[in-house]
Structures are given as structure tokens and as C-alpha cells.
Amino acid sequence: MEKKELQAGLNCRLVQVNAVGGKTGRNFRSAKVRVRDIHQPPWVDREIVHLLRKKNNLRRKANVVSHHEISASEPRFKANLFNNYSQSVFNAPVAGESVRDFVSKALRYLDVNKASFGIPSRLLKECSEEITVPVTTLFIKTLGTGVFTNQWKDANLVPIHKAERKSIVSNYKGISLLDQLSKILEKGVFGRLFDFVSPKLTTWQHGFFPGRSTVTQLLQVVHLLSSALDKKQQVDLVYLDFSKGFDRVPHDKFLPKLGTI
């Protein structure tokens, strides 16, 4: 199609588009594109324009949102509606899930690429159907008697260098590789206790808490500082770092604390 023909006032033309395929050079598709505006390239057809308009409409924010015959236009009321909707569709963990179902799922989804101690993860995963019943029985008896087998208490301690001189032993931290069965049991107990314990924890707890991390902790501190600056208030920060904190926790004092929860 020549430029002179377009300028002659041909507002509607049929353009033949041939697509040549591969090395054979054979035409495998022939499509006709109707050009309705000479000022637009022929490849901008009606379907593409429709998709672009649809995308622009999706980007626009709704002035009024509604849910269950309740409408809101102010930001905070909109947020409450979205919060209520999210809670209504949230699938909470099934309290009646059997121990057998949990064990079967945990064995089938073991990560064989992670290092472990004791029975290899791949063996547990490949034999998950055959060992689900005996492992479930073992877990039930362990929880019923309150006796944790000594073999699950063993660990393969791997030293990981932290900083400074590598020749100093105190510059290393130990990573314990635990038995996979003990980790599955621990995960099951954690899932049952977390919903009970989490409401009793302070909102300032960010470590070892699902959905929280060092990033959320920094965001909370920055928000506190910004609010204080806006109100022209003074803020004093004290950062403490407990060396070997987990290793030095006295069990005779820690266990009674857990008993009071």
C-alpha cells in the first residue's frame, strides 16, 4: 500500500496480510484487516482498541463500592467493606482434620532438596502411602504419653561462619539438622497451638510470626518515628542484642512461663 493512495481519501481499504512460516516459506495464514482510518496504522484493529479501552476502565477506581446491599464512598468505609468480604471468603483451617490426613499430606509434600537428619526425605516421600498409618500411630502415642523419643532429640550440628576471623570458634553459629519425622510432629503441634497462643502475644512481636518479618518491624518503627515528628514529640530508641539468646534460655524458667499462657 503506497502513501499516495492513503492521502487520496481512501478511508476504507482492504489490506491483505500474508504470514510466511518457518524455513519452508509456505503461507500458513491469510488475514484481512479493515482500515477505517487512514491516520491509524493498519495493525491497530478494532479488537486491540477494545482491549486497550477495557484496560483503561479497569484502572479507574470506583467512587462507590458495595457488598451485601451496603455501599460506601469514603476510604475508611470502603476498607471495612473489603475487610468484611475477605473474612467471609477466608477458609479457616478445619479443626476436625484427622492426624492421619495431616501426616499423609506432610509426607507427600516433603522437600527432598533440603538437608535433613535421620531417615532421608526422599525415602519418606516415596513411601508416604505405606508409612502414613504407622507414623500416625507413633505420633498419637507420643502425644498421648508425653514422651519424645530420644532418637528425635539427636541433631547434626553444622557450624556456619557469621563474621570476622574464621579461626575463632565463637564467630560461628550452629545450624541443627533435625529428623524429618520430628519436624512433621512439631509442625502439627504448632498448627494446633498457634491460634490459641497468638492473641496473647504482643503486637510488637515480629520474629518467628507468620506474616511478619524484619521488614514489618522496620515499617512499624518508621511509622512511630514519623508520627512523633509530626507531633513534635521526643522518641528514645534502645536496641539490644542478646548473644546466643536461644542457647542460653533457662528451661527451668521458660517452661513455667509457657504454663501460665
Image (tube, rainbow, N blue to C red):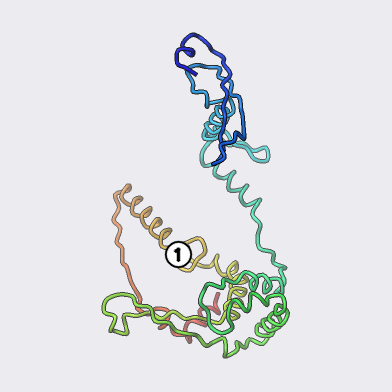
Q: Which residue is mark 1?
A: 206
Instruction: Report the residue that reaches farthest toward the top.
Output: 8
Q: Amino acid at mark 1?
A: His
Residue 48, x across and y down, in percent: 56, 29
| Residue at (49% x, 80% y) in the render | 177
Structural crowding at the residue carrying mark 1, measured as other residues with C-alpha within 10 Å and reported as few (<14), some (14–19) or many (≥20): some
The residue tagged with tag 1: helix, strand or loop? loop
| Residue at (55% x, 66% y) in the render | 198
Residue 26 location, quadrant: top right
* Numbered-mark total: 1
- State the quadrant of the C terminus: bottom right
| Residue at (49% x, 23% y) in the render | 41
Residue 78, x across and y down, in percent: 55, 40
Q: Is residue 109 above or below residue 85?
A: below
Closer to us: 26 or 88: 26
Instruction: Report the residue that reaches farthest toward the bottom.
Output: 150
Q: Is residue 80 above or below residue 62?
A: below
